[in-house]
């Protein structure tokens, strides 16, 4: 039996990160039936129950070290872990796991990672030293490859793949419709989904909330239903409510936190997604739902370019204009099939790239099997 440890940002209720864990655990089981999976988590008991895997508390240093020693391979990912935009402490945390794993002779793979920003000479030197010691790197964006090369990471094999979330399957249409009915969302109407997050680095503050409220009002007046979807419920529900309060018309807000497969299914019932959070857009892509992205981070801009979907605004540097976004929406509804066909083409390519993460992982697992066989 091969023992595998997943080290990511799990157990915090972030639907995107949980979707990545769902994709990883599902795909690992597809490529190998001799792997025992453990994941670090802020809420390990919930993670055990949700994914039917082992889990250890991320801040219990003793349990974490024991898990690293016990396992044969550590997957760092998915998501953007190697960065100090959140904090230098977060960067050092994930680098320390990698360093400990290599110290104890374990294989390490950066799995579908985003990289950066990594700022400061000390932090960049640390990333260079630690990440150059891993066995394999797969990255979900081309700019992450460029960032690693700029930092000086050149020893492991590096592949640009795609986010693991492209491989997940949502719940059935019937199950999604049952959730929407329970939430009081009329499914006989065209539904416009809106995923907004708080972003205090926006060049024009909360202007984007005010303008999105105008966009949503116009959609309701056009006879459509507006559904606000908090992707990290504990953090996104408040700003979703602020958006609703600024509207003149009524909209719906998901009333609780849902599992990733449920959110994918719900998004699959939309006619259009307006999204800030990356995985709201990726889920829409998986379900071939046309989208308009609100850019707050390079990863969102990257995937909108790859998917060839419209950009409503880049709030890092510009105001969101309700008239522009409303015009984009009407353009999509006027020729919606064109956008669906484009997504079908682009997502097919991205699914293959996402599956490359697991083909490369399978090679690592085979190396471990051979080593175990030689040691018998």
Image (cartoon, rainbow, N blue to C red):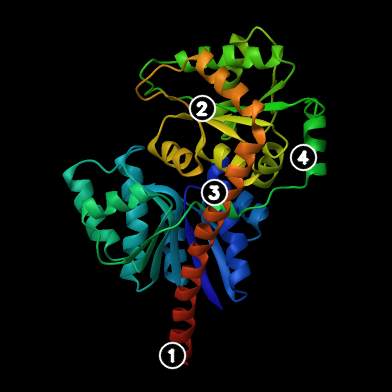
Look at the image and tell me whether residue 242 can be seen. no
Look at the image and tell me whether residue 222 can be seen. yes
In the image, which disc is placed on residue 375? 1
Query: Disc 3 and disc 1: Cα gap in Å?
Result: 45 Å
- Dots 4, 3 in contact, CB < 8 A: no
Neighbourhood count class around disc 4 (C-alpha, 10 Å): few under 14, some 14–19, many 20 upward:
many
Foreground disc of the pair 1, 4: 4
- Dots 3, 1 in contact, CB < 8 A: no
Of mark 3 and mark 1, the one earlier in the sequence is: 3
Query: Disc 4 and disc 3: Cα gap in Å?
Result: 25 Å
334 or 99, nearer to the observer = 334
User: What residue does disc 2 label?
Assistant: 197
Neighbourhood count class around disc 1 (C-alpha, 10 Å): few under 14, some 14–19, many 20 upward:
few
Of mark 1 and mark 4, the one earlier in the sequence is: 4
Q: Is residue 58 above or below residue 331?
A: below
210 or 258, nearer to the observer = 210
* Secondary element at image label 3: helix
| Left or right relative to 107: residue 44 | right
Query: Disc 2 and disc 4: Cα gap in Å?
Result: 23 Å
User: What residue does disc 4 label?
Assistant: 176
Res 104 quadrant in image:
bottom left
Res 195 quadrant in image:
top right
* Secondary element at image label 4: helix
Query: Disc 1 and disc 2: Cα gap in Å?
Result: 51 Å
Where residue 218 appears, as percent x and y from the top left, is: 64, 13
Of mark 4 and mark 3, the one earlier in the sequence is: 4
Of mark 2 and mark 4, the one earlier in the sequence is: 4
Foreground disc of the pair 4, 3: 3
User: What residue does disc 3 label?
Assistant: 346
Q: Residue at x 23, y 47 (%)?
A: 123
10 or 205, nearer to the observer = 205
Foreground disc of the pair 3, 1: 3
């Amino acid at each position: 039996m091969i023992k595998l440890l997943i080290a990511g940002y799990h157990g915090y209720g972030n639907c995107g990160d949980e979707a990545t864990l769902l994709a990883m655990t599902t795909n690992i089981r597809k490529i190998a039936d001799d792997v025992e999976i453990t994941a670090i988590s802020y809420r390990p008991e919930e993670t055990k129950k949700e994914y039917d895997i082992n889990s250890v508390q991320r801040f219990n240093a003793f349990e974490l070290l024991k898990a690293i020693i016990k396992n044969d391979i550590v997957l760092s990912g998915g998501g953007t872990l190697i960065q100090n935009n959140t904090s230098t402490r977060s960067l050092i945390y994930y680098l320390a796991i990698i360093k400990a794993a290599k110290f104890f002779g374990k294989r390490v793979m950066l799995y579908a990672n985003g990289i950066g920003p990594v700022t400061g000479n000390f932090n960049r030197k640390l990333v260079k030293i630690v990440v150059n010691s891993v066995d394999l790197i797969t990255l979900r964006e081309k700019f992450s490859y460029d960032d690693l090369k700029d930092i000086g990471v050149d020893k492991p094999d590096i592949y640009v793949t795609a986010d693991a979330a492209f491989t997940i399957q949502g719940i059935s249409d019937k199950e999604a419709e049952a959730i929407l009915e329970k939430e009081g969302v009329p499914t006989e109407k065209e539904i416009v989904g809106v995923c907004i997050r708080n972003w205090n680095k926006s060049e024009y503050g909360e202007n984007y909330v005010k303008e999105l409220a105008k966009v949503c009002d116009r959609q309701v007046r056009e006879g459509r239903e507006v559904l606000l979807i908090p992707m990290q419920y504990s953090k996104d529900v408040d700003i979703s409510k602020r958006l609703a309060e600024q509207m003149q018309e009524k909209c719906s807000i998901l009333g609780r936190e849902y599992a990733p497969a449920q959110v994918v299914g719900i998004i699959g019932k939309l006619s259009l997604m307006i999204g800030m959070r990356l995985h709201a857009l990726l889920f829409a892509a998986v379900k071939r739902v046309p989208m308009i992205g609100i850019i707050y981070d390079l990863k969102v801009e990257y995937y909108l370019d790859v998917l060839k979907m419209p950009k409503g605004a880049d709030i890092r540097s510009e105001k969101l204009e309700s008239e522009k976004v409303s015009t984009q929406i009407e353009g999509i509804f006027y020729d919606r099939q064109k956008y669906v066909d484009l997504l079908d083409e682009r997502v097919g390519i991205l699914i293959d790239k996402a599956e490359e993460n697991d083909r490369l992982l399978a090679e690592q697992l085979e190396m471990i099997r051979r080593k175990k066989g030689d040691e018998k």
